[in-house]
Amino acid sequence: MQNKNFVPKDKMLLGFVFGVLTFWLFSLSMNGVVDKLVVDQSLGLSIEEINLGISITALFSGCFIVVAGGIADKIGQMKVVYTGFALTIIGSLLLIFANSFVMFICARILQGLSAACIMSATLALIKNFYEGAARQRALSFWSIGSWGGGGFCAFFGDIIATNYGWRTIFIISIVVAILGILLILGTPDRRNESSNTKSKFDWSGLVFFLITLISINLFVTNGNKMGWLSPLILSVVGVTIVAFILFYIIEKTKKEKAFIDFALFKNGGFNGATLSNFLLNATVGVISIVPFYVRDGLGFEYYGWLTIGYALTVLAMIRVGEVVLRKIGAKKPMLLGTTITGSGILLMALTFLPVNVYIVAVVLGFFCFGLGLGFYATPSTDTAISNSPNEKAGVASGIYKMASSLGGAFGAAISIAVYNSLLPAAPSLADIEWAASITLWVNVSFCVLSILSILVLVPSKKS
């Protein structure tokens, strides 16, 4: 049932933020506790199994976020939000009691599915419940959970794991999820009235979409180990191309029944926001590469604290981005935010500097990194959902957040692959310095491509 007279309150918005936090803050904090997982005898996992468990959450959230958005449009967006919270709780419980690889992987998959449900449906609800300046305000708070949570996950997990054990992260996650449920109770549901709830789901499109993404991931993560021109890797490339062509044909044929509606990509503003969002999220590899160099190359043990500027500035700038959006539109703050982010990465790429000077450069670099992302967040999100029709709000929101998750997943994989491919079997300090610098320059290139996508696709006029 849809209550057209419902007036949203801030407690509902806070509940949405808590839901987003359970993924971006608590689930992604696993990136910072790899060493704790390796020595946990109750799990007995290898480093390869741990890395799979970490990446699979972002991959599943990216693959299924559009599906969840489409389902939310059909059966009700609040139903999907509640489902997401339930999956968060179940996944966190499995991690708390995990004693095998199977339990670990299942828990991480559930967390990815939870993120797909919560992020797509809450964005769609914000589009439906708010308009104009109120929507921009709501999006800026939502972004605090998304972009701000991503900032804190850079060091949050290590602090909690070191002092209380890594499983404590997910005890806190359950508490936050329960609080989120309590805050959104009573919120009326929303769905697309024109949707046919009995229509068949586009499983064939989803299968080929998954094959395409998994094949790309295999190519990026295993190309260096197996050889970029090896028969197996070339076969993976072939599978990727064929799967994507079949996926495109299926989606164009099914049109309205397709789970990715290509009609949404006819809008330049939506394309620019989504593509730049994908590319900017790809710079998450910086969070992995800089600690590798600082720890392995420079012997600096307290690398986690170097990212504190990222966490603080991304939160501080989100509301500033909202204010600037209202005054001058989205394009300029999106360009400025991306440029500042790239400048921060550029500072961190100066690995040839003396150790003490470089540490200062890293601190300033992460400060700029968060500053730029926070400035970019609200204008980009507002551009994406404002340039989509109301009846497709769930799918459009899902595509935009799919860009976030997949950008992060592939960006991290690319950075690690480049870094490892540049290191010899017994690397010297100069080798590590070179590998880190080149990899960080790759991340600078992501920012350059993001800037170009904004310049070409996002309209200049104030919305």
Image (spheres, rainbow, N blue to C red):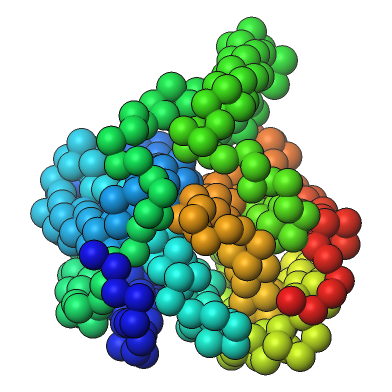
In the image, what residue occupies the spot 28% across and 35% down? 198
Image quadrant assignment for residue 330: bottom right
Residue 61 percent across, percent down from the top left: 42, 49
Q: Is residue 402 visible?
A: yes
Q: Is residue 238 above or below residue 414?
A: above
Image quadrant where one finds the N terminus: bottom left
Q: Position of residue 450 (x, y in %)?
A: 78, 58
**Observer-nearest of 32 and 134:** 134
Residue 115 percent location from the top left of the image: 37, 57
Determine whether 185 is above or below 405 in the image. Answer: below
Q: Is residue 123 left or right of residue 325?
A: left
In which quarter of the view is residue 296 placed? bottom right
Residue at the farthest top position: 231
Q: Nearer the viewer, residue 328 or 162?
A: 328
Residue 99, image x, y percentages: 14, 46
Q: Nearest the camera: 405 or 124?
A: 124
Residue at 35% over, 48% down: 74
Q: Which residue is painted at 74% across and 76% down in the image?
A: 463
349 vs 289, left or right, is right
On the question of residue 354 being in view, the answer is no
345 on left or right of 6: right
Between 191 and 276, the one lying in front of the other is: 191
For the point 59% across and 51% down, which residue is it? 403
**Which quarter of the figure has residue 124?**
bottom left
Numbered-mark total = 0
